[in-house]
Amino acid sequence: VNLSSYAGNLVKIKFIAVTGSGINNVLPRSHIIGDSDDIAIDNISLNSSLSSPLIVSNNQTWSSYTSLCQNLTVQSGAILTITGAVIMPKQAIITVKTGSKLIVTGGKITNANIIVESGGELKLENNGICVLNDNDNLTIDNGAEFNFVSGEIK
């Protein structure tokens, strides 16, 4: 199934299955969790390439749970304020361009691989949190601003 037309959206997949006669359960039905048989899903292929970046070109506040499937770019002149939880895919990059701001105020970014370009600003306040993955970096270019009021980078 190709889900590329849903890139950037949260996609929930529901599997409805009927078990065959190939596997016999050794426990009585009443002991099986959820009172149903197990199913197995084989031959799944996950594409790890990221779709084109999500561009923030005007002032926005993200106050709810947001799960992205792509890179994120805050364009010049825009302010992106995170007060909710943002989950980035592993290997994705948040780029804060010249003349733009990323403000994490009481919110949380997970897999926070962030590049703040010269003239851009990253601000952590009100216990905002940026969680870096094993290979993530927080890069503040020369001429960029990192305003750490309160919060945590871990």
Image (cartoon, helix red, strand yellow):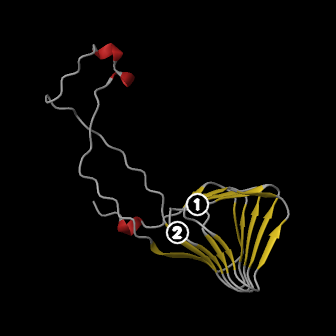
Q: Residue at x 52, y 68 (%)?
A: 92
10 Å neighbourhood of mark 1: few (<14), some, or many (≥20)? many
On the image, the x and y values in percent for residue 50 come to 44, 70
Amino acid at the residue labelled 2: Ala
**Which quadrant would residue 26 be assigned to in this image?**
top left
Image quadrant where one finds the C terminus: bottom right
Image quadrant where one finds the N terminus: bottom left
- On screen, residue 112 versus residue 8, left or right, reads right
10 Å neighbourhood of mark 2: few (<14), some, or many (≥20)? many
Q: Which mark is residue 92?
A: 2
Q: Nearer the viewer, residue 9 or 32?
A: 32
User: Gap between marks 1 and 2, in whole Å?
Assistant: 8 Å
The kind of secondary structure element at disc 2 is: loop
Q: Residue at x 34, y 20 (%)?
A: 32
Q: How many marks?
A: 2
On the image, the x and y values in percent for residue 148 come to 82, 66
Q: Residue at x 37, y 68 (%)?
A: 5
Q: Which residue is mark 1?
A: 111
On the image, the x and y values in percent for residue 99 come to 74, 85
- On screen, residue 71 versus residue 121, left or right, reads left
Q: Residue at x 35, y 64 (%)?
A: 47
The kind of secondary structure element at disc 1 is: loop
| 97 over 41 or under it: above or below | below
Amino acid at the residue labelled 1: Asn
**Which quadrant would residue 54 be assigned to in this image?**
bottom right
| 46 over 60 or under it: above or below | above
Q: Name which of mark 1 and mark 2 comes first in the sequence.
A: 2
Q: Which mark is residue 130?
A: none
Q: Nearer the viewer, residue 53 or 63?
A: 53
